[in-house]
């Protein structure tokens, strides 16, 4: 994907009552509210960089209903370059389309389903939010980040423990073999 360059302008679609503190648009960028960004920096969390202001050009509703009463100021951020954290392929419950990854560095291969995953011991560098090798599409967060979200009441984030994550768009069911332990 091409890098999003300034000027940063967005058109938002409101699905519920109010706009959230965290928005994951297409690509590698994330939108966070100014409130989220300030608290993230104050608490010394790691894993996000950039923090550039975004102009909200328009907000439209997905369905009928009242317009948003408040449009927060947003900033565009990006997760730090790919983390050294790596998916533990032996202990994770990932169904690969053709074959498991052959590249030990990127660990990428087409996936049909995920029924929980774990990180390989000793690969995580302590970042609070990151994209692990082997599951670049999955934002993964630390327990410290989860407590941070709960403490501040940030919205538009659903945090699922990695061992409980289920993604199975083809509805094929979990892998037949059980990993050692998640």
Image (spheres, grey):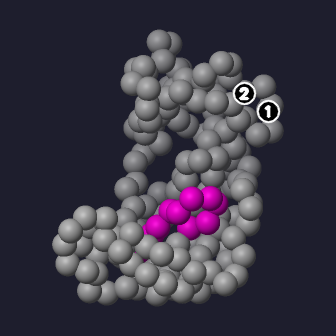
Residue mark closest to the camera, 1 vs 2? 2
Q: Can the viewer see residue 47 in this picture?
A: no
150 and 36: which is toward the camera: 36
Residue 73 magenta-drawn? Answer: no
Quarter of the rendering containing residue 99: top right
54 shown above or below 176:
below
Indicate the quadrant containing the N terminus: top left, top right, bottom left or bottom right: bottom right
Horizontal side, residue 55 vs residue 156: left or right: right
Expressed as whole percent of the image width and height from the top left, the position of residue 58 reads: 43, 81
Q: Residue at x 44, y 26 (%)?
A: 170
Q: Is residue 24 magenta?
A: yes
Report x, y in % for residue 131: 63, 52
Q: Position of residue 145 (x, y in %)?
A: 48, 64
Mark 1 to mark 2 CA distance (whole Å): 7 Å
User: Dominant secondary structure of the magenta stretch?
Assistant: loop
Q: Nearer the viewer, residue 10 or 139?
A: 10
Disc 1 to disc 2: CB gap under 8 Å: yes
What residue span does the magenta drawing correspond to?
21-30
Q: Classify 10 Å Cα crowding around label 1: few (below 14), some (14-19), many (20 and above).
A: few
Which residue appears at 74% of the width and 50% of the height? 84
The numbered disc on residue 101 is 2
Q: Residue at x 50, y 29 (%)?
A: 113
**In this view, 105 is above or below 32:** above
- Secondary structure type for disc 1: loop
Tell me the residue that label 1 is attached to: 104
- Asked whether, in this view, residue 78 is left or right of residue 55, the answer is right
Q: What residue is drawn where x is 50% and y is 62%?
A: 24
């Amino acid at each position: 994907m091409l890098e999003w360059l300034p000027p940063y302008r967005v058109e938002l679609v409101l699905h519920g009552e109010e706009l959230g503190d965290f928005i994951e648009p297409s690509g590698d960028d994330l939108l966070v509210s100014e409130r989220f960004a300030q608290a993230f920096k104050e608490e010394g969390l790691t894993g996000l960089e950039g923090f550039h202001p975004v102009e909200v050009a328009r907000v439209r509703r997905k369905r009928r209903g009242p317009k948003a009463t408040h449009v927060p100021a947003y900033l565009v951020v990006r997760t730090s370059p790919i983390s050294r954290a790596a998916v533990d392929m032996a202990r994770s419950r990932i169904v690969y389309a053709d074959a498991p990854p052959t590249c030990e560095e990127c660990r990428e291969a087409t996936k049909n389903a995920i029924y929980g995953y774990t990180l390989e011991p000793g690969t995580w560098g302590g970042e609070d939010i990151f994209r692990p090798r082997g599951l670049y599409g999955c934002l993964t967060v630390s327990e410290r980040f989860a407590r941070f979200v709960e403490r501040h009441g940030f919205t538009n984030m659903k945090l699922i423990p990695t061992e409980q994550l289920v993604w199975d768009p083809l509805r094929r069911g979990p892998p037949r073999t059980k990993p050692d332990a998640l």
